[in-house]
Image (cartoon, rainbow, N blue to C red):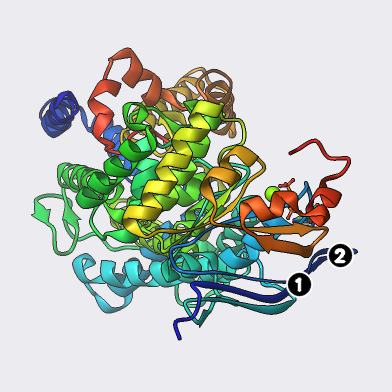
Amino acid sequence: MIPPLLQVEAVSKRFRGLQAIDGVSFEVANGEIVALIGPNGAGKTTLFNMIAGVFPPDQGRIALGGGDLVGLRPDQVCKAGVGRTFQLVKPFANLSVEDNVVVGALHAVTKVAPARRLAREVLDLVGLAEKRGRPARSLTLPDRKCLEVARALATRPRLLLLDEVMAGLRPAETDRMVGIFQRLNRDAGLTILLIEHVMRAVMALSHRVVVINTGKLVCTGTPAEVVRDPRVLECYLGEDTV
Amino acid sequence: MKQSLALLLLLAAFAAAPLVASPYLLSVLVVVLYYAYLGQAWNIMMGFAGQLSLGHTLYVGLGAYASAALFVRFGVPAAIGLWAGVLVAMLAGAAVGSLSFRFGLKGVYFALLTIAFAEFTRILFQHLPGLGGTGGLFLPVAERSGVHLLTLRGSPAMFYYVALAMTAGIFLLCRFLLASPIGYRWRALREDQEAAQALGINIFRSKLAAVTLSAGLTALGGVFFAFYYNALFPDQAFGMPRSIEIILGPIVGGLGTLFGPILGAIILTPLGETITWATEALGFKAAGIKQLFYGLSLLAIIKFLPDGVWPRLKRLLRWDADNDDGDGDEGAAR
Ligand SMILES: Nc1ncnc2c1ncn2[C@@H]1O[C@H](COP(=O)(O)OP(=O)(O)OP(=O)(O)O)[C@@H](O)[C@H]1O
Ligand SMILES: [Mg+2]
């Protein structure tokens, strides 16, 4: 039996007094697009940080293709095949847009010239090609989010973790991004786990949705199932994010 | 294209200088080249990789003392002794680096540690037997003319050309480094460590490479210092003021740029010399006048040209268009 690409098993994380994640388990199969949703402060980014090796979980297991990720540094998790974006974008501000992506591409190829070619391909793909010579600090927030995606993609990951990359985009731009990810998923077989508040994107993109609230798993299911689930509605009550 | 041409012109001007310059002017130009070289070496760490070393004279001193001691005590020629100096400095750099980076020491805390190491070594060398202590270590000079590169003995012009070759060499090395994968990794971690790490960069290894390389190159400057001045004192070789003088050039010229350290040295050294000369000519003794001047120029740069002189000059000359292919000369500041 082939193990799922990503396995998160009974993972918990406590920040001082706060139980940020409490015994969460879910899986992402090879080639799947899974959305991770939940109200603000639910613990979504905390989960990403544990997968990406920023800090280890207190308990539980995280594995990629059967290999343990817990205890690896972020650069080792990247080597294992996980690309990630940051919710609070972290561009290399004084480098050009292209050089930002070259840094990512140098993870996939060893020489600068092919890395630059790869970077240009990726910039074309996400629609930043004509801004490639500009310093990253001059980009608008939506463009910075795009740059996060481009950099992560340039590392040629097996699993892409997207943390709210579509927040702040106009509907047309959201649809364009959704199209890009669908194509990457279909043509390159890229597996994607995305945190997203924009339900338009979640509905269009994800094969499956994982809902968490106050650090606990609420339910998983297809997008259509999840939006009809009373438990999901309940955890969003009093929230206007949907 | 334009940059290469300007560079060749600058090199030609420097190469021709001994033909016309007075002995005094030549000695000033040696100091210009010496600080351009050291600034370039320091810039690898701070300008490229974003690691602030405020005790960089540690490596100057180690390179100087190691090669000088081998020469004085065992008659080892400079061309061989320099390897010992470089090696010792690289080991020291690796020790400072691994100690701090292993424990995640960053920014100001790392900078403080580099000062501590330099100061500790200064005090150590004041008390180390056999190296002259506070009284100084002196290198015998048999010949002051001709060209003896192996022993680094010869005329002022020879020292001038050695300094010029070193400065040109380190410039080319830095240009190569910036265009190579390690240069991209350094700049990435300078800009954002977390993002760099998420893109697969082993930040410990990359930082350690920067410190070690910078330390070794700086030590080479120290070897030059020892054989040019022929006298070493712990206070001078390892003293804090020297560390500051090393870093002023690149900051004034433009942190993280290739031309910044050269430009900074060209601007600051003659001005500093002039001020010392002028105050002496006017007949009042003011010990700290040069330091005061350096402090003021730093303030002025931070206030009016926070990116340094070179990035502004480049814009004025409209050379930024040249820079589209990412030769990495965009600098580090803001
Ligand atoms: N490094 C940290 N130290 C202490 N507390 C933290 C840390 N990171 C997150 N938290 C806390 O853990 C909880 C979950 O935060 P997290 O960022 O994972 O939420 P989220 O689901 O991503 O929310 P949002 O939708 O607003 O991004 C929050 O209460 C947050 O304040
Ligand atoms: Mg979040």
Where residue A175 appears, as percent x and y from the top left, is 49, 34
Residue B173 placement, left or right of A201: left
Residue B123 placement, left or right of B87: right
B104 or B288: nearer the eye? B104
Which numbered dot is residue A16? 2
Category of crowding for the residue at label 1, using alpha-carbon neighbours closer than 10 angstroms: few (below 14), some (14–19), many (at least 20): many
Q: Give the quarter of the image for residue A94.
A: top left
Q: Can residue B136 be seen in this view?
A: no
B281 lies above or below B110: above
Residue A166 placement, left or right of B143: right
A197 or B56: nearer the eye? A197
Chain of the residue where label 1 is placed in the rendered structure: A
Mark 1 to mark 2: distance in Å?
A: 13 Å
- Mark 2: which amino acid? Arg
Q: Which residue is drawn at 9% across and 51% down?
A: B146
- Mark 1: which amino acid? Ser
